[in-house]
Image (cartoon, rainbow, N blue to C red):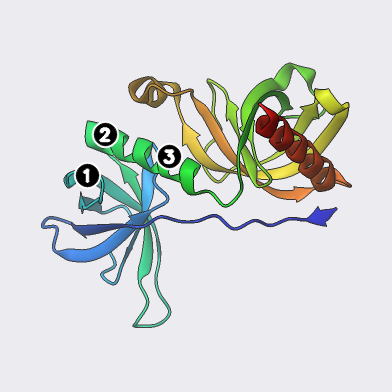
Amino acid sequence: MTNRVLERAKLRIKAKYGRMDVKHLGFVRNLSAHGLCLEGQRVLPALSPVNLRLFPTDIPEFGMKGEIRWVREARYADLRSVMGVKLQGRSSQYVDLIKTLADHNLEKREHSRFYDVLEIYIDPEDSNMKKYSRNISHGGLFMQTDEPFKQNSYVTLKIILADILETVFVDSRVVFELPPDEAARMGADPGNGFEFLEFYGDGFKILKEYIERLSNLSTLQ
């Protein structure tokens, strides 16, 4: 296998938090429909309630409630600890924020993304697990499905490149989860965003040549 570990930009949003009063300064990142990561120098214990106030740049500030699910304390005093937060309900402002971040990632991603309908198999040995992708890049793809995987799941994908009669196998990680109910509120397709981690055989070379072909076709149109 050829190792292709690709870095992902992690947007951080300024926040305040606390068990009661939101008085501690911090940041949130890795936002999903169900939770987020909270960075701060003040550590709250696991299973404790937390009040959050987010200060995005594109929409007005807003508050949320959640529960600390896990804690990773900083080893040094000048670093921030990280806490995993499970959200209790999702406001319309939070849904708007996720949509804004998704649009930002599409515009700012490192790898150009091209649009084509591709067959994707979650289990390479099971033809009943067929899904579809409508956009793909060197670094990952979005797969449309009404039963998305949980964020940070690891999945082996079988990608059918029918136009060039090739098949690519790649170990991937779920970096974005959009359930059907949230997708309906956002006017988007439900599914998962996958980050490619490790290709089998000449998979990366084949995918690279396929994407170059899509790029040339888009230039001619």
Q: Quick one: which residue is furthest to the bottom in this view?
A: 77
Q: How far apart are marks 3 and 1 (CA)?
A: 22 Å
Indicate which disc residue 65 carries. 1
Q: Which amino acid does label 3 sit on?
A: Ala
Q: Work out which quarter of the rendered image holds the C terminus and state it.
A: top right
Task: Classify 96 as above or below 190.
Answer: below
- Foreground disc of the pair 3, 2: 3
**Residue at mark 3:** 102
What residue do we see at 40% from left, 74% from top?
A: 74
Q: Earlier in the sequence, mark 3 or mark 1?
A: 1
Q: What residue type is labelled 2?
A: Gly
From the viewer's perspective, is 85 left or right of 18?
A: right
Q: Quadrant of residue 10?
A: bottom left
From the viewer's perspective, is 154 left or right of 72?
A: right
What residue do we see at 34% from left, 82% from top?
A: 78
User: Which of these two is toward me, 68 or 14?
Assistant: 14
Question: Helix, strand, or loop for circle 1?
Answer: strand
Q: Which of marks 3 and 2 is nearer the N terminus?
A: 2
The percent position of residue 180, horizontal first and vertical second, equals: 44, 21
Residue 45 visible in the picture:
no
The percent position of residue 121, horizontal first and vertical second, equals: 73, 27
Question: Helix, strand, or loop for circle 2?
Answer: loop
Q: How far apart are marks 1 and 2 (CA)?
A: 8 Å
Task: Classify 112 as above or below 28.
Answer: above
The percent position of residue 216, horizontal first and vertical second, equals: 73, 35
Residue 92 visible in the picture:
yes
**Residue at mark 2:** 89
The percent position of residue 149, horizontal first and vertical second, equals: 56, 33
Q: Which of marks 1 and 2 is nearer the N terminus?
A: 1
Residue contact at pointers 1 and 2, CB within 8 angstroms? yes
